[in-house]
Amino acid sequence: MSEKIIRVALDAMGGDKAPYEPVKGAVEAVKQSDEVIVVCVGKKEVIETELAKYEYPKERIEIVDATEVIETAEHPVNAIRTKKDSSIVKGMMMVRNKECDAFVSAGSTGAVLVGGQVLVGRVKGVERPPLAPVIPTGEGCALLLDCGANVDAKPSNLVQFAKMGSLYMENVMGVKNPRVGILNIGAEEEKGNALVKETMPLLKACTDINFIGSIEARDVPYGGADVIVTEAFAGNICLKTFEGVGMFVLKKIKGALKSSIITKLGALLILPALKTTLKDFDLDQYGGAPMLGLKGLVVKTHGSANYKEVRNTILQCIAFSKHNLPEKIEQAVREQTVSE
């Protein structure tokens, strides 16, 4: 067994499919890795009922009772302030107090974003922590940041996103010297809005990242860059379009294969190869979106996350915690501040 066991606080009440999918994800995670303990935070009796359905190493899943739930429609700031006994607040406080190494939630995105900054706290020097999902590409995967936290960003924010994203891809995902691109409407340097044009020379001047210039949205699936930097408005549209097109294409393929006796027979022949190919573009395999730039790890999964996404997000936390990302991010930000 590893010298360090990673403790992950899991919001067992968050998401469209809570508590059964989060709890099942916790069970699958501890069965797959002996390096993690999952602390399920939420209504104790409800969690116990779900856990009773499974066989798992009992010493590796704990329960912390939380009587309140922050709903998606609630005002995030008010919810964090008033619902002290909610699964989100209690889970984040465990990270803040060093009782857990990470917090995972499929619950209210707004509450997770607010709680991450207010309760867990930002790394010194980080201006705005971004949400950074890993997305599949033809070259493996890429990190897209920001995808939902900072709709209105400044050039200095995007420079920090680039540095934090590079550290994440190199340390957690094992990509050496990751290529950083800024999301743009064309490859030419003179193209783009005011934010892109102001950020471009700042990124070119960074000697600690591998900046390759602009990347268009159509080149993202082909693996045109390993780290894709943008503000949250464009980033979220890019991500949702990516997800939507993927689901649409998959639906059309399934429909075509079931359209006649001949196509059904053909489907049997290509099914193994098709499954392997489609697995490469399964977003669930990469887990959730970490909120980079915090003093502890906070990861947001989709509201509709199934147990596979929850499991992989929990396992993702192991690599993050082992590489001391907050300390490395603080060092990178400090160097940026000195150079300015």
Image (spheres, grey):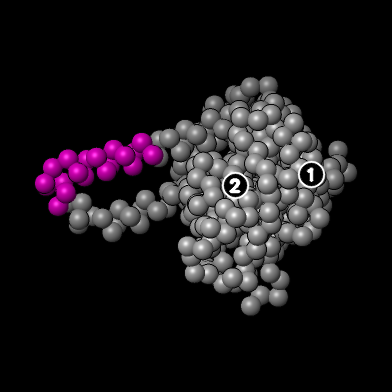
The residue drawn where x is 36% and y is 53% is 277
Q: Check disc 2 and give the amino acid type.
A: Met
Tell me if residue 170 can be seen. Answer: no
**Nearest the eye: 286 or 200:** 286
Figure quadrant of residue 321: bottom right
Q: CA distance from mark 1 to mark 2?
A: 19 Å
Q: Main secondary structure of the magenta part?
A: helix
Residue 146 at x, y percent in the picture: 64, 37
SS at badge 2: loop
Question: Label 1: few (<14), some or many (≥20) within 10 Å?
Answer: many
Q: Looking at the picture, tell me which residue is in the foreground, 149 or 178.
A: 149
Considering only vertical position in the picture, is 107 above or below 192? below
Q: Position of residue 292 (x, y in %)?
A: 70, 46
Earlier residue among tags 1 and 2 = 2
Looking at the image, residue 8 sits to the left or right of residue 27; the answer is right
Which numbered disc covers residue 119?
1
Q: Position of residue 127 (x, y in %)?
A: 79, 37
Q: Which residue is mark 2?
A: 13
Residue 67 visible in image: yes
Front residue of 217/120: it is 120
The foreground one among 332 and 130 is 130
Q: Residues within 10 Å of mark 2 (few under 14, many from 20)?
A: many
Residue at disc 1, secondary structure: helix
Q: Is residue 258 magenta?
A: yes
Q: Hey, which quadrant is residue 95 in on the image?
A: bottom right
Of the residues tagged 1 and 2, which is closer to the observer?
A: 2
Residue 149's place in the image compared with 119, above or below, is above
Residue at the bottom extreme of this rendering: 1
Quadrant position of the N terminus in the picture? bottom right
Which region shows up in magenta? 247-265
Q: Which mark is residue 30?
A: none
